[in-house]
Image (spheres, grey):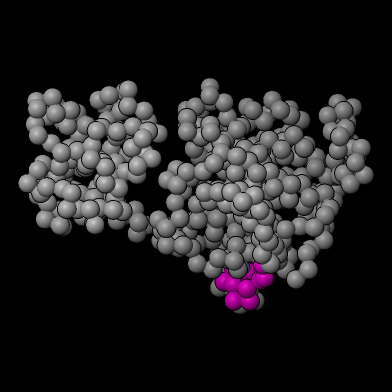
């Protein structure tokens, strides 16, 4: 498939807003003096309506650049609040925004950047129940989410409504960008017919992310969005751009429409939105977590027993680089090494296992119980709860 020459995608973009004020002309003058944008293009931007799904790492450059560029109406969908750990990459937010709803904090920042823009906030989780109604009023949907159920949901809703989906994703040091949902173009399901097994791909919270990476990938999405509105250049539709930050290399994969695609193929079987958590196997994972009942000790109980001089062996099942951030002077055996290093533990000893939040150490306790250990507890809430409930000098991460 040759690269698609762009046509303006929206009816709205074909009937641009009538004029720009003198102030807008000054604000957008560096656009206006380029023949590729000009007055015609700036009026298309002003008439365009773009919905951003997620106001986090990808949403930050997207929101900032689309607002600065003069996209007339921008919708912001997010249900989260600003967390202190977001500030390392979600550059829309400032330190004083911590604890505020992300949509509210983003709207405040973006309306300060460009008061000409109509900013509409939707402080809600995108679901199969609300997606079609939310998308209906917009010309282009931009996917800035970080989880598989939402990506499939955004894809299917865009196809059902015939709207372009500007897609971006990041993983550790790598990014992906493309445009799905163009007429005759492939969709997310053509590329990934099946979601990965739940838990296989860690989130940013679990796997970490270098803060500038979503800045680069989100900026590329913003560029593609603006090109779609202007009807200029070659779209990434039909091409998957792969970016490797470590080697600083861009690669490109040709994407083809899958004739057997269940949502965009000729014999499609999906005609309405489905349960995407179930499709991605998330339900089962949640149940699995709840099912893991292991003996627990609270941080306060542990502190009291240590103060009494009880002989407790602290087992830390985190990774060595986490141990460097903070530790309880425990014996370090990362969870993945536990099966082959179990001989380092004495089953006659009373053991308290901990990790960051209590999840990995619950698995460790479960494993050790099955291996015959009887006197073993999981530190409830991990070293994070220890920091909150016992010793605030222990840093949280
Ligand atoms: Zn498809």
In the image, taking residue 88 as reference, residue 320 lies left or right, namely left
Q: Nearer the viewer, residue 338 or 232?
A: 338
Count the marks: how many? 0
Picture layout, residue 159 above or below residue 207: below
Q: Quadrant of residue 193?
A: bottom right
At 69% from the left and 47% from the top, the residue drawn is 220
* The magenta segment: 255-264
Can residue 143 be seen at all in this image of the molecule?
A: no
Q: Is residue 257 magenta?
A: yes
Please give the name of the residue rendered at 82% of the width and 61% of the height, measured from the top-left corner.
5
- For the N terminus, the image quarter is bottom right
**Horizontal relation, residue 396 to residue 159: left or right:** left
Queried whether the magenta region covers residue 362, the answer comes back as no
Q: What is the x, y in percent for residue 306?
A: 14, 28
**Residue lying at 53% horizontally and 24% vertically, measured from the top left:** 95
Image x and y of residue 84, in percent: 47, 30
Q: Nearer the viewer, residue 280 or 138?
A: 280
What's the residue at 58%, 29% (across, down)?
93
Magenta span: predominant SS is: loop
The quadrant holding residue 386 is top left
Q: Is residue 234 left or right of residue 60?
A: right
Position of residue 106 relative to residue 269, above or below, is above
Ligand 1 shown in quarter: bottom right
The quarter of the rendered structure image containing the C terminus is top left
**Which of 386 and 188 lies nearest the eye of the viewer?**
386
Most distant residue in the left direction: 348
């Amino acid at each position: 498939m040759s690269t698609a020459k762009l046509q303006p995608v929206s009816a709205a973009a074909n009937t641009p807003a009538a004029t720009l004020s003198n102030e807008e002309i000054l604000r957008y003058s560096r656009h206006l003096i380029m023949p590729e944008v000009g007055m015609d293009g700036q009026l298309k931007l002003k008439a365009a309506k773009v919905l951003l799904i997620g106001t986090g790492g990808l949403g930050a450059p997207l929101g900032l650049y689309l607002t600065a560029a003069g996209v007339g109406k921008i919708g912001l969908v997010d249900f989260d609040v600003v967390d202190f750990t977001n500030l390392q990459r979600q550059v829309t937010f400032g330190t004083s925004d911590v604890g505020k709803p992300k949509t509210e904090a983003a709207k405040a920042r973006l309306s300060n950047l460009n008061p000409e823009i109509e900013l509409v906030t939707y402080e809600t989780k995108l679901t199969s129940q609300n997606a079609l109604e939310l998308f209906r009023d917009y010309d282009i949907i931009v996917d800035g989410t970080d989880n598989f159920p939402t990506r499939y949901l955004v894809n299917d809703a865009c196809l059902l409504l015939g709207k372009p989906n500007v897609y971006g994703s990041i993983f550790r040091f790598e990014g992906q960008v493309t445009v799905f949902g163009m007429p005759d173009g492939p969709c997310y399901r053509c590329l990934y017919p099946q979601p990965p097994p739940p838990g296989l791909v860690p989130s940013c919270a679990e796997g970490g992310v270098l803060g500038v990476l979503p800045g680069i990938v989100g900026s590329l999405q913003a560029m593609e969005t603006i090109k779609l509105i202007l009807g200029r250049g070659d779209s990434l539709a039909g091409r998957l751009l792969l970016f490797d930050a470590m080697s600083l290399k861009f690669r490109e994969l040709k994407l083809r429409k899958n004739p057997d695609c269940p949502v965009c193929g000729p014999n499609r079987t999906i005609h309405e939105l489905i349960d995407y958590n179930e499709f991605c196997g998330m339900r089962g994972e949640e149940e699995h977590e709840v099912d893991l009942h292991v003996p627990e000790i609270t941080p306060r109980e542990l502190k009291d027993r240590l103060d009494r001089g009880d002989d407790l062996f602290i087992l830390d099942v985190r990774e060595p680089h986490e141990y460097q951030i903070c530790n309880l002077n425990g014996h370090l055996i990362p969870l993945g090494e536990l099966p082959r290093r179990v001989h380092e533990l004495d089953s006659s000893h009373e053991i308290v296992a901990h990790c960051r939040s209590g999840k990995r150490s619950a698995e460790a306790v479960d494993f050790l119980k099955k291996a015959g250990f009887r006197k073993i507890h999981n530190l409830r809430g991990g070293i994070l709860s220890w920091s909150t409930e016992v010793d605030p000098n222990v840093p949280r991460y």
